[in-house]
Image: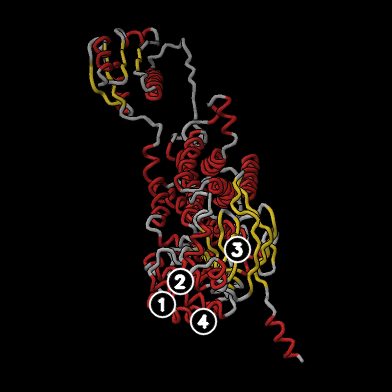
Amino acid sequence: MIKYLIEKEFKQISRNPFLPRLIMFYPLVVLLIFPWAATYEIRNINLCVVDNDHTTYSQQLTEKAVSSGYFKLTAFEPTYQQAMQQIESKRANVILEIPPHFERDLINRQSANVLIASNAVNGTVGGLSSEYMADIVTDFSSQIRHEWQQTGKEPPSVPTIEVVSQNRFNPFLNYKLFMIPAMMVLVLTIMTGFLPALNIVSEKEAGTMEQINVTPVPKFTFIFSKLLSYWLIGFFVISVSFLVAWIVYGFVPAGHLSTMYAFAGIYILAVSGMGLVISNYSDTMQQALFVIFFFMIVLILLSGLFTPVNSMPGWAQWVAAFNPLKYFIQVMRSVYMKGSGFVDLIPQFLALVGFAAFFNLWAVISYRKSN
Amino acid sequence: MENLQHSEIITQPEKVIEVNKLVKRFGHFTAVDHISFDVEKGEIFGFLGANGAGKTTAMRMLCGLSKPTEGKGKVAGFDIEHQSEQVKKSIGYMSQKFSLYNDLKVWENIRLFAGIYGMNDKDIKEKTALLLEQLHFEKERNVLVKSLPLGMKQKLAFSVAIFHTPEVVFLDEPTGGVDPATRRQFWELIYEAAAKGITVFVTTHYMDEAEYCNRVSIMVDGRIEALDSPHNLKTEFEAHNMDEVFQQLARKATRKAD
């Protein structure tokens, strides 16, 4: 019996004017375009320099800032006030003011102050650009000390202590490596959670659901035939995603593919259960779409996809604890980046199994063939 | 001796549908109000009533799509409330709204529903060929159902509903919106099915179609107001045709049509 139903699903999917394209292109678009756009790396920050010193060192510092690649030198202004006008007119984001006697202080007192002012209307850009600039200045000063050591210029008095920060697992802070595993979760959620839900509701709308309901198709065979088709599609899509990550970005998971496939299997169960619950309570596509839209936004924003869950307020973290996306994103990121194995991911495993059981049980209870 | 016994069994009317004081309430609204009737094997049973009289609700209960609030009903020997899955195996159903898969081809729809009712690939193949020939649909075999004209769609839907030779087939306004010539052809299909021993339970608004039925029941405001053969009903109500019978009964209705 189920053979005929699965056959039907695939015929319908292949004849749908939209679905095959969605299945092929959605993962590609998400993986090829999104990681470039959804990045926290900030480049091309417009820099305005106020150089009150005009010495070799001040010039070197300016050059260093520009050559870092983060900053674009847009103006030299003689005074801080004039530089502020650059910021007010939005021609500059950051001011670097080098005080008079910068070189002299640096040589004589082994310390000099510079002023970094940034436009913090966009908090992220403001914060990050002053951080970048501070890094550059620190780097600059250690570089000079190094030069002095070599030329024997350094007075023996002050030992320098440097704080070294090291970025583990993603040494170059590559945001793409951070985003891509999470993007795969997003794609999988839509393919295996929401597409089958919409498909079921569309059968309700067309009246074919009722025709099926008067046949002896057992309660779950019909739904299962749909889910199975979309599960196959889900595994196809995630395999394509792994390939794209490897071919286009050169990302190979540090952990085992099998760990990710196993978790994907459980995750697919959980989200398709969620989709079923939505479809059980919706009579029209419109209704289902609105519900999906609502949940999708909440689920994505509270998943840690863009902003870390740990830095959310307590209540939001509490809500996020009930978000299956969060757990699967954690799994994908840690397998891809840290090479975590199953044992490291037992909490996520238990959470996902819990979601799968909960949503599918709810779906079973709320599904009725007759009323 | 054996032959005699055999013929006795045949002449004894076999009840395929038995309904006893069936009630369906939606909140305070009683859609179906204590209806009782029997339908015999091979009979064409017309189920008439104005819009909103409760025909579709009653039919949905008989098909196991809807649970009765009160009362008992048996279809093909199975209780509609507790054995609805067995009921579903023994019936065919054609809904008011065309509900085959528009994005499947003619043969694919037949194959799907036949498969669902447990027929095997070989039987399906043979019977499909036979059916398409009878309906003169050979050319349309590979046509998507959505591009068929309405008359053809309805004939196909009926043929799919009886493809697995059920004991009863339920037809909910099967000829709505179809031209008179196609309607006639449709009724020929119904007669063929009945001749094969399939009981036909049909709702309709066309009073000329009511004349084709062996027996007719007329529902008014959720109750069955009349139930007999068209001939007897006309005598009883001193009417020339079924339309007049219907008008006399429907005038009593207090419920608004939906």
Q: Position of residue A348 (x, y in %)?
A: 61, 41
What is the secondary structure assignment of the residue under circle 4?
A: helix
Q: Can you tell which of label 2 and label 4 is closer to the viewer? A: 2
Please state if B86 lies on the left or on the right of A34 as rendered: right
- Of mark 1 and mark 2, the one earlier in the sequence is 1
Numbered mark located on residue B137 in the image: 1
Q: Chain of mark 3?
A: A
**As rendered, which of A90 and B125 lies closer to the eye?**
B125
**Where is mark 2, residue-wise?**
B156
Circles 2 and 3: CB atoms closer than 8 Å: no
Cα–Cα gap, marks 1 and 2: 9 Å
Q: Along the polypeptide, which appears first: circle 2 or circle 4?
A: 4
Q: Element type at marker 3?
A: loop
Q: Are marks 1 and 2 in contact (CB under 8 Å)?
A: yes
Q: Residue A155 appears at what percent x and percent y?
A: 42, 11
Residue type highlighted by circle 4: Glu
Q: Could you say which is closer to the camera, residue A176 or residue A323?
A: A323
Marks 2 and 4 in Cβ contact (< 8 Å): no
Q: Nearer the viewer, mark 1 or mark 4?
A: 1
**Which label belongs to residue A217?**
3
Q: Which mark is residue B70?
A: none
Label at residue B126: 4
**Quick check: marks 1 and 4 in contact, CB under 8 Å?**
no
